[in-house]
Image: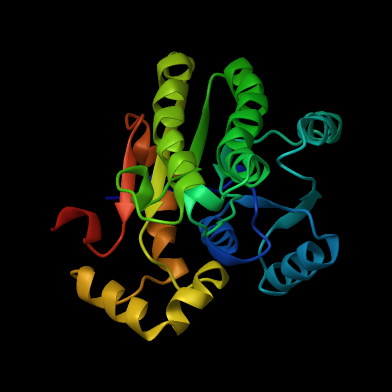
Amino acid sequence: MSNSLFSLKNKTALVTGSSRGLGHAIAIGLAQAGASIVLNGVDQERLQAASEKMRDEGLSVSEACFDVTDEASVIAAFEAFDREGVALDILVNNAGIQLRKPMVELTTEEWQRVIDTNLTSAFVVGREAAKRMIARGSGKIINMGSLTSELARATVAPYTVSKGGIKMLTRSMTAEWAEHGIQVNAVGPGYMLTDMNEALMANAQFDDWVRGRTPARRWGKPEELVGTAVFLASTASDYVNGQIIYVDGGMISVL
């Protein structure tokens, strides 16, 4: 099979929340497959440092500093892309946050902040990207799900609800946009070695639980999401739509 099936040469990809963590690993992987990357985040200094490091490695990258939870900023960013002639072929809706707190102690403001960041932003950024992709008759959108797209854990209710919503948002986008040549799918990472999970990794009891509960007997590495992301961003997945692929060492498959 030709590697060109998975090539992203001459493609441009926006990865939200990509100055670090899973988003940054995916951005690097897409760039190594040939794509020009638009990194996104709200910290301009960190965003620039991440871009410079990628450029030093010979990768094609630019930055778009905007808050995905601010609709006006999202719209302004896409209008800027239009003015600059940046046509996005690929969108990865990765930006997200976690909040660990019992539901009875959650404030509505805390709940809404997680929902807005993890779910509503994917709708808003996805909508703006799809408007342009529909006009061109092609595009790839990858939403970031989670094991909690299927299963719940105590103390992470807003995160669980947001990621369950991502699963159905992916299907809703498919229902409306597939006929326009747009493939929308999701990736569901398992427990990954990221900054967001540092406290969990440092907890010996939780670390033992992850290793015992996961058939692979270990945490995942951010770069292990790259193959799935490249597949979903490439022509190899042109008839794959509305799916969520779990990259979790087998956790979701076993009791």
Residue 216 in the image: x percent, y percent? 22, 72
Q: Nearer the viewer, residue 155 or 235?
A: 155
Q: Nearer the viewer, residue 207 or 143?
A: 207
Query: Which residue is pictured at 46% across the width and 14% down the height?
Result: 176
Residue 86, quarter of the rendered image: top right
Residue 151 in the image: x percent, y percent? 30, 48
Q: Is residue 45 above or below residue 87?
A: below
The structure's colour scheme is rainbow
Residue 72, quarter of the rendered image: top right
Residue 8 in the image: x percent, y percent? 52, 48
Q: Is residue 130 above or below residue 205?
A: above
Query: Which residue is pictured at 65% across the width and 29% down the height?
Result: 124
Q: Is residue 39 above or below residue 14?
A: below
Tally of numbered tags: 0
Residue 130 in the image: x percent, y percent? 60, 24
On the picture, is 97 further left or further right than 65? left
Q: Is residue 168 above or below residue 104?
A: above
Query: Which residue is pictured at 57% across the width and 72% down the height?
Result: 195
Residue 200, quarter of the rendered image: bottom left
Look at the image and tell me in which quarter the C terminus lies.
bottom left
The reply to whether residue 59 is visible in this rendering is yes
Residue extending farthest left: 255
Q: Nearer the viewer, residue 164 or 181?
A: 164
The reply to whether residue 7 is visible in this rendering is no
Query: Which residue is pictured at 40% across the width and 38% down the height?
Result: 164
